[in-house]
Image: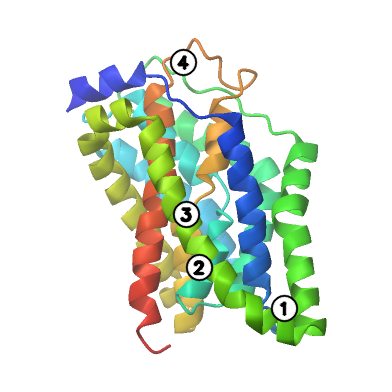
Amino acid sequence: MFEALQAMDAAKLNFSEGGLLIMNIAIAIIMFGVALEIKLSHFKELIKKPKPVIVGVISQFVLLPFITTCLVLIFWNNITVGVAMGMILVASCPGGNVSNFISNLAKGNTALSVSLTAISTMSAIIMTPFNFFLWGKIYATIGPWTDNYLLQELTIDPFDMFRTVIILLGIPIILGMITNHYLSKLTEKIKAPIRIFSLVFFMGMVVMMFANNYDHFVKYIFWIFIIVLIHNALAFFTGYGFAAINKLSIQNRRTIAIETGIQNSGLGLVLLFNPKIFPQDLPLGGMMIVVAWWGIWHIIAGLTIAGIWRRKEV
């Protein structure tokens, strides 16, 4: 296993800018569809009772990176630096925008999901580089590796992050809520088609991402599947368990589990493909494949969990 992962560190992935652009546009449409079921009264309730938001932020930006670092330290003799740092990078990213759609599908608290996504995305300007450097440094210091060449100091452009939040989250949600409020009849007609589009799109993205990197995924999929499966399951369990300990409702437990288990791996890939952050002559294959497979697997796992929860009464 270890030898296979070492070879994977030197692999190069194929992700086009055009594909990422299409994904961003589709996510904006999906966010619009999610917002069609959100009302201002949802957010007023959250302001009155902020506990679920606080629990969600702690679960995502404190517990997940901590537990991830514990996991890579436990398995330090069976994973490479690239794989370990890829896991830490994923755990340092904010919640993915698709989490709002999945939370809605799972009969969770959609308004809470949207709030947590917005808060975590804006906080990522500081928290993503901070968490990656902090927990990566801890791994490099007390782990078995003395060569920490992959531990690069992250810098995120605040303007780019703010623009991403406004385009992918802010504008679609505002438009969706306005449509829901003023055009209720139209809302009822388009909610179902947009929901179907969302499912078809994400299944298509899974197929496309796999096809573009078929050789790499087939060669290393067995080991990466196990690693990401354990890591992702632990993320869902952490979110749900922490919410349960804090005696939150079933709806809020589902939402926080999904927000913790669905990470913005797209941001992770953008960071990895940025030569100003990670010099491309470094052996980043392990990091890239872990982050890329996370982007595929968390959709599959999230939709599966949402499908199960949707059949159960809240």
Dot 3 amino acid type: Phe
Dot 1 amino acid type: Phe
Choose the circle earlier in sequence order: 4 or 1: 1
Q: Which residue is mark 3?
A: 202
* Tags 2 and 4 touching, CB below 8 Å: no
Q: Is residue 233 above or below residue 135?
A: below
From the viewer's perspective, is the residue at label 3 or at label 2 nearer?
Answer: 2
**The one of 65 and 16 positioned closer to us in this rendering:** 16
* Tags 2 and 1 touching, CB below 8 Å: no
Choose the circle earlier in sequence order: 2 or 4: 4
286 on left or right of 51:
left
Element assignment for label 1: helix
In which image quadrant can residue 217 be found? top left
Choose the circle earlier in sequence order: 2 or 1: 1
Q: Residue at x 32, y 38 (%)?
A: 72
Q: Which residue is mark 2?
A: 196
284 on left or right of 197:
left
Label placed on residue 149: 4
Screen quadrant of the N terminus: top left
Dot 4 amino acid type: Tyr
Q: Residue at x 56, y 14 (%)?
A: 279
Label 2 and label 4: CA atoms lie apart by 44 Å
Element assignment for label 4: loop
Label placed on residue 43: 1
Q: Is residue 174 above or below residue 13?
A: below
Label 4 and label 1: CA atoms lie apart by 44 Å
Dot 2 amino acid type: Ile
